[in-house]
Amino acid sequence: MHGQAHPITTAQAGARAGSIPGLDGLRAISILLVMISHAGLQNLVPGVFGVTVFFCISGYLITRLLADEFDRTGAIAIGPFYARRMLRLSPPLVVYVAVMAAVWSATGHTADPLGVTGALFYFANYLAIFAPHRLDGIGGHLWSLAVEEHFYAAYPLLLLALLTRGRGVVAVLLAICAASLASRFAVSMLAPGVAVDYTGMATECRIEGILAGAIAAIATRGPAGAALARRLGSPRAALAALAVLLTTFLIRDPLFRQTVRYTIQEMALVPIILAVVGAPAGSWLARIMNSAPMTLTGKLSYSLYLWHLAAYDVALWLAPGAGARLVVAYALGIGLAFLTAAASYWLIEQPFFGLRRRFGSHVRPAEPVGDLAMRADQPARSA
């Protein structure tokens, strides 16, 4: 190797072990933003931004894994990728929808067949925009899962074609980002009555967030990319990006919020993601983001996203009232959400880990909380 040596980073250590530990901490922040926002604080805490963070993390992680696979083998195994996605998302989702539909029916309602179908087959986002009543008893929050699955239905094929071509990957992805931004402007101008929901949940309007993470992963490949990642992920760049993010929350103009708000936030998230995954092992940032509570919350994030609104409903039923009682109810709801998510993770997700590994997944078996705490206190190391 030539040039100055750099300390091993959490991203490098994680890549050797088949994961990127810092991303669990980012997932934890994302889901906590969503959960706190939905706990009656939507005017103070930007829950939609939490979903934007999820999108960027997803694009970065999956693109990095697919690009690494291409670098190793010269190809991307498309079939196993789809199998991994199905085994990751479907089992908890099927159980969640079945339970919610049963509870909704038990309370004297009828679960809408179109809503159930939309939840299970990933078109809940368009139902949430045009027919939200169809999702009564199930949850309109499933819209974000639909956006991701629409994107990943085509993205591996596109990425394989672009990587095989060997050039223009970032340019093509940026062009799709521009088209996504243009679609938000078009809807805002031509259909203002549905613009807030459509620009916030429609697939063509929100895939830009996933692409932002994907572009970051592609642009930071190789030696030149590693140097770029160090510059973009420097403390100064990350702090500047954080200041930009805070500014976007203060601007309340509707056209801005429906259009360029997403673009600016996604661009600002890139240095923050790179700062986290590039943090030297043992640094304060790495220790916080890889701490046991953050790691555990990140691992539970998918099930927390599915179940937290249902947990809130149960808590509000158990502890009705306003003022302090409402605070108690939501605190109880958060506790119930974590208990339910933990049960989902260990009883539903965990049994499929072995099968996912057969299709090339790097997912690790679940670790007891004590083991997570011990690992969080140690420098990241290769497997």
Image: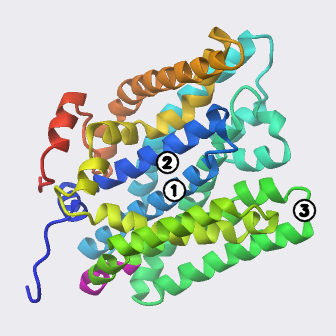
Q: Which residue is mark 3?
A: 192
Dot 3 or dot 2, earlier in sequence: 2
> How are the residues colored?
rainbow
Task: Tell me if 275 is positioned left or right of 29 in this view.
Answer: left
Image quarter of residue 382? bottom left
SS at circle 1: helix
Q: Give yes or no for contact between labels 1 and 3 (Cβ–Cβ under 8 Å).
A: no
Dot 1 or dot 3, earlier in sequence: 1
Whether residue 305 appears in this view of the structure is yes
Q: Which residue is mark 1?
A: 53
Residue 197: x and y in percent read 78, 53
> What's under tag 1, amino acid-wise?
Val
Q: What whole-number distance in Å separates the C-alpha atoms at marks 2 and 1? A: 6 Å
SS at circle 3: loop
Majority secondary structure in the magenta region: helix
Q: Which residue is mark 2?
A: 30
Tell me if residue 137 comes above or below residue 64 in the rendering: above
Tell me if residue 83 comes above or below residue 37 in the rendering: below
SS at circle 2: helix
Residue under the point 75% across and 61% down:
252
> What's under tag 3, amino acid-wise?
Pro
